[in-house]
Image (cartoon, rainbow, N blue to C red):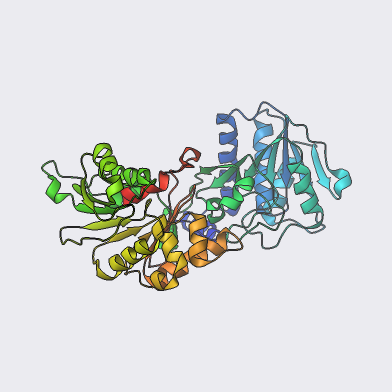
Amino acid sequence: MKIFSAKQIRAWDQFTISEQQITSASLMERAALACYTWLLNHDMTNRPIMVFCGKGNNGGDGLALVRILLNNNIPATAYILETGKPGTEDFQNNLQQLHHISTDIHFLQSDNFFPFIKTDSLVIDALFGTGLNKPLNGIARQLAIHINHSGATVISIDVPSGMFIDKSTRAHTAIQATHTLAFQQVKLAFMMPENYRYTGEFHLLPIGLSEKFETMERSRYELVNPELIRQISRPISKFAHKGERGHAAMVGGSFGMMGAAVLAAKGCLHSGVGKLTCHTPDCGYQVMQVSVPEAMCKITGEHFPGTFEHSDRYSGIGMGPGIGTNKKTKQLLMEILTTVTVPMVLDADALNLLAADSQLLHMLPAGTIITPHIGEFERLFGPAADDFERLETAIEKAATQQIYIILKGHYTAVITPGKMVYFNTTGNAGMAKAGMGDVLTGIIT
C-alpha cells in the first residue's frame, strides 16, 4: 500500500471525482458515511456527541456526519470554529443542509464560547485536514488545548487537527486523538513515533478512491501488507533439502554475552536456513552446542571471536550479537568487510564498532544490511531534530553507500539503496525487550 503526500492526496481526490464522474460533495458524503458506520460498529454513539468543525472540507465532513447522525436519531451538536472567512463551497452546502434539520449549531468566535466538555462525551475533531500548511495559532490553538484537556474520547477525522502529515509537528500544538479515522490510506506522519500522542489508534476507512490513481502514482513510501508479501514470497518446494536452503554463518557471542549469539542462531534456523555455522569464542562453545544443537560451531578465539574462516559455501553472513567492541573484534570486522563477497547483516556491537570508526562505516560493501535501533542509528549518522529528519538521513545514507538500513521501531522502516521505504506494521510493545534485535539479525541472515 503506497503512502502519499498531502499534495498527492488532493490529486487523488480530484482524479476520483473526474474518473467516477461524481461531485466533491458526493465524495464528502462517502467519507462521512464511512465515519458514521465506524462509530456504530464500535459502539460510540451512546453518549453525548460534540462535533468540532473548521470551515474547510474537513469541517464539511464533520457537518455531513452530524446530519447523518441526526437523521438516524442520534443526538449530535455542531461547533464551528469562526475564523471570519467564508467556508469552502462544500462546507457551506453541508451547513445549509444541517440548518434544515437542526438549530443546535454553535459558532466559536473566542474562547469565551468554548463549550464545557464532559469526560463521558465523544468529541469528533473535524477542524483541519491534510491540507494544513501552518501551525495552529490563536483561537484554533486554544480550542485544540481545550479539547486535549477535556479527558473525553476524541475521534479525529482523517488526521488529527494541527498535525502535519509530511513534516514534524513536534514543536507545535495538535489534537491528541484517541482514534484517528483515516480515509483510504495511512499518512506518513502516522509511522513516526513522535506522533503517536496525536494519532492514538488509527483505522483505515475505504471511501472508494480511484484504484487506477493508486496504481499509476509513484511514492517512495509503502506499507507492507499481505498483497505486497504475496508478490515477493517464494514458497519452498515439497522436495527441498537442506543443501538448497542456504548455508549461513553467524559471528556472535563473547564471555557473558553468549545469549545474544544463541538467540540470533535460533532466529536464523527457525526462519528456514538449511545449515548454520556459528563462529563463537571457546568460552561459548558448550553454550551454543547445547542450546542450538542444529548449528555447527567454529571456535575462533578464547573470550571473543578472533578470526573468520571464510568459505565459499556460505550464502550469507550475520555479525554483531554479543561480540563486544575490543580491538580484536574491530580487526575481525575489518577482515570480514574486506574479504567477504556474500550478503551480510550487521547489528549490535558490529554497529557500535562502525560508529566508533567512520573508516569502517565507509568500507561497507554494497548491499550490506544494517539493523540499527534509533540510538544505534544516531551513533552511526548523528542526532536528528525529529523523526522525519532521521528518516531523511537514513534514505540519504542508504542511497549514498548503497546499503539497506532497517530502522527498528514499532513501525520498522526498511530503507533501500534505491530510496524506497517500506514500513512494517507487525510490531508490538511486547517486543520492547533485550534479545529481539538478536533474533531479527538471525531471521534476516
Q: Position of residue 438 (x, y in %)?
A: 38, 48
Q: Position of residue 327 (x, y in %)?
A: 38, 64
- Furthest-front residue in this view: 302
- Furthest-top residue in this view: 46
For the point 48% across and 49% down, which residue is it? 411
- Furthest-right residue in this view: 112
Q: Could you say which quadrant of the image residue 162 lies in?
A: bottom right
For the point 59% across and 43% down, which residue is it? 180
In the image, 190 versus 217, the foreground residue is 190
- Number of marks in the rendered image: 0
Q: Please state if 369 lies on the left or on the right of 249 as rendered.
A: right
Q: Position of residue 159 (x, y in %)?
A: 61, 50
For the point 83% across and 47% down, which residue is it? 108
Q: Please state if 34 lies on the left or on the right of 222 as rendered.
A: right
| Residue 217 can be seen in this image | no
Q: Position of residue 45 (x, y in %)?
A: 65, 29
In the image, 4 versus 100, the foreground residue is 4
For the point 82% across and 36% down, which residue is it? 116
Q: Please state if 71 lies on the left or on the right of 254 as rendered.
A: right
In the image, 334 versus 228, the foreground residue is 334
| Residue 289 can be seen in this image | yes
Q: Please state if 6 lies on the left or on the right of 219 as rendered.
A: right
- Furthest-left residue in this view: 239
